Amino acid sequence: MKRPVQEIAKRIGARLIGDGSAVLAGVASIGSAAADDLVFVEDEKYLAEALRSAAGAVIAGEFAAAAAAESSKPLLISGHPKLAFARAADWLYEQTSAELEAATGTDATAVVSPSARLGAGVVVEAGVVIAEGAEIGDGTTLGAGTVVGRKVKIGRICTIYPRVTVYAGTTIGDRVIVHAGAVLGSDGFGYVRDRETGRYEKFPQVGQLVIEDDVEIGANTTIDRGALDETRIGRGTKIDNLVHVGHNCWIGEDVVIAAQTGLSGSIVIENGVVLGGQVGIGEHARVCEGVMLGGQGGVLPNKVLRGKGIVFWGTPAQPVREYLKQLAALARLGKK
């Protein structure tokens, strides 16, 4: 949608310097911006480039106020330019009520059980299958080829991209985004070995998966349901592509998990944890609130990482300063 700069400034809580009547239609990088685009600057060294660009307006920190007289561009001054830019983008690309109404409906090739309940404004694209007893909340979109199992509950204003598979009994909250190819609620990797025969027999996988509000799940990520109880993904957590979450895991709120991370069963990840790419965590481990674990870090089974704001690295994971000291010592030994 096209929005006047003064309305954008008010919406995101920024201080406007300059002409607020200019109309913007989108966001862009400084190098690719057009006259109706909004750009942002977090570092003062990029401000001059932004002011010379074709952009219609610039979001910047307080440092930009002094440059206002040197530019005809409107400036939106914010204490957190990147966050303000993200919020402005979300508003600019928001669909109008007319667009939402036009998109609403169920494609003729979709298969929807008569016992499924679809809320107002739901979009069901080509080839979707919705099984008996499923509930889809108002304003949710199900992408082409998505499969929604029995008694699945999906909340309001969710975006489920193409070819997502949601197994029976899974619960998904409001405003959840699930990218293409994700598999939610599949069986956990649980087996019992018969000591006499050496064969493995499947342990029951009859629990549930609960995904809370405002979660985003990346493409081709897999999240197993609980074996007997539940796997839970907390509010606001963001999970990247190609992540695996095993059965019975409890992931807290506002956790960030980067690509190719693997979590074994029965792991607890507390609120505000950040896990880098290719992290591996063994079963029954706990990562406490606010811990940051660097890429390819490893946590052994049953271990606990504590220390809000502390960065851990290596396998077994340890505070990054200690790990770097050990690497340096090994390097010196190698030279000798």
Image (tube, rainbow, N blue to C red):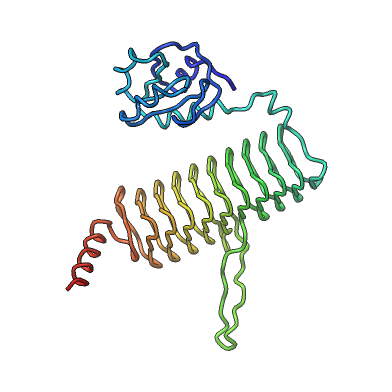
- In the rendered image, residue 317, in percent from the top left (x then y), is placed at 33, 62
Q: Quadrant of the N terminus?
A: top right
Quarter of the rendering containing residue 316: bottom left
| Nearest to the observer: residue 142 or residue 175 | 142
- Between 248 and 139, the residue placed more toward the observer is 139
Name above or below for residue 65 compared with residue 151. Answer: above
Residue at image position (45%, 45%) is 253
- Quick check: 114 left or right of 247? right
In this rendered view, identify the residue nearer to me: 196 or 81: 81
Q: Residue at x 67, y 24 (%)?
A: 97
Residue 276 place in picture, x, y as percent: 41, 53
Residue positioned 71% across, 51% down in the render:
147
Pinpoint residue 295: horizontal percent, then vertical percent.
39, 56
**Image point (44%, 29%), residue name:** 30
List the single residue furthest toward the left.
336
Image height of 187 relative to 88, above or below: below
Compared to 27, does 310 lie above or below?
A: below
Q: Is residue 330 left or right of residue 84?
A: left
Q: How many marks?
A: 0
